[in-house]
Amino acid sequence: MAQRNSVPGKTGVKRVKIIGTGSAVPDRVLTNFDLEKMVETTDEWITERTGIKERHIADEKTATSDLALEAAQKALKDSEIEAQDLDAIIIATSSPDMLFPSTACLVQSKLGAKKVLAFDLLAACSGFVYGLEMVKGLISSGIYKTILLIGAETLSKITDYTDRTTCVILADGAGACVLTVSDDESEILSTYMGSDGSLGDLISLPGGGSRLPTSHKTVEQGLHYLKMNGNELFRHAVRAMSSAAEKALERAGLQGEDINLFIPHQANFRIIKATMDRLGISMEKVFVNIEKYGNTSAASIPICLDEAKREGKLKRGDLILLDAFGSGLTWGSVVLRW
Ligand code: UT7
């Protein structure tokens, strides 16, 4: 049976653009001062080492699909698109509601988007830029026209709040974009993605999969919580993000100075600063909101995009560079004209 969203015969390469954004974070705010009461840390340490002052944390009843749904509804409204107009829904997440069905299918049902392609994409903090690469391929092929791409996480659900090396940075949130065929100057100009699985141990969720199925033992050992060697990751993050940005710029035929706004994954302010120093980019051109949201993994870049748009920081024709790094290891950079 022919797929509803396939368009036989229309296979010329299409250009792809973002037509709307939305984001959502839980109401509950966890400040550095709250964390001082939970683990041996200080507001001063967290602020100096990460740039984070507070983060939003979901309550017991809120799962990733709830935040994803709210961000999606806002992005659809912003795009003036109905859920029925969508051809696909992709959710980048490392903290799905459950292993299956996918969080994308849960959101598809709640949105009432009929018969769309729906799946989750797992590339950790690089998930949203990996997703843009997928969406670009699907739309430019002419087979899919309009796609909802969401980055959504409730990392608090996989965080050990007795481990000060992770609980001070991880947070919850969702950001969404609607993308479609471009008929004007706005488009994704270039992408560059990479991975290195040999360094997968640096940040992982060891328990609950087929290697270490959930058992009393895995729970006793805390293997259902995210584990991270932050210091080692830091070095790889700066190297991978600066190199990915350089390669994406080269593919677009652009220089760093041509870019109007850099939107890096908000992992740590010092990683962002070191990456921009390496690229020779002034921090005035860099969008940073980590102080309010912490590290929301796949959600961080789409939350930034939505906030930058609402603050009037994205002007028609502006050149934007997105840059991410995360577990896998994975990394990726996207250059687009707004
Ligand atoms: O999202 C993508 C994937 N994630 C990342 O890219 C995260 C990258 N890494 C980081 O953001 C940073 O490495 C952290 C914020 C996680 C840690 O900062 P750091 O400057 O690399 O600290 P460190 O691990 O080298 O630790 C320095 C000291 C240690 O104490 P000693 O051994 O020097 O006595 C830690 O035990 O700071 C201690 N420490 C803390 N102290 C107070 C570690 N965490 C804390 C804390 N509060 N929360």
Image (tube, rainbow, N blue to C red):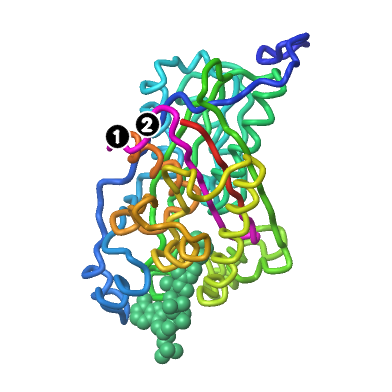
Q: Secondary structure at mark 2?
A: loop
Q: Quadrant of ligand 1?
A: bottom left
Q: Is residue 218 above or below residue 11?
A: below
Residue furthest to the bottom: 40
- Give the labeled residue for mark 2: 315
- Give the labeled residue for mark 1: 312
Judge whether residue 326 can be spotted in this image: no
- Marks 1/2: CA–CA distance: 7 Å
Give the total number of marks visible in the rendering. 2
- Residue 167 point in image, percent of width and height: 39, 68
Q: Is residue 143 above or below residue 314?
A: above
Q: Specify whether 261 is left or right of 256.
A: left
| Closer to the camera in the image, 205 or 8 | 8
What range of the chain is rendered magenta?
310-331
As drawn, the label of residue 190 is none
- Residue 317: name its quadrant: top left
Disc 1 and disc 2 in contact, CB within 8 angstroms: yes
Residue at x-position 66% and y-position 61%: 213
Q: Is residue 63 above or below residue 75?
A: below
| Closer to the camera in the image, 172 or 224 | 172
Q: Is residue 265 above or below residue 197?
A: above
Examine the structure image and report whether residue 161 is included in the region drawn in magenta: no
Examine the structure image and report whether residue 320 is included in the region drawn in magenta: yes
- Residue 155 point in image, percent of width and height: 45, 56
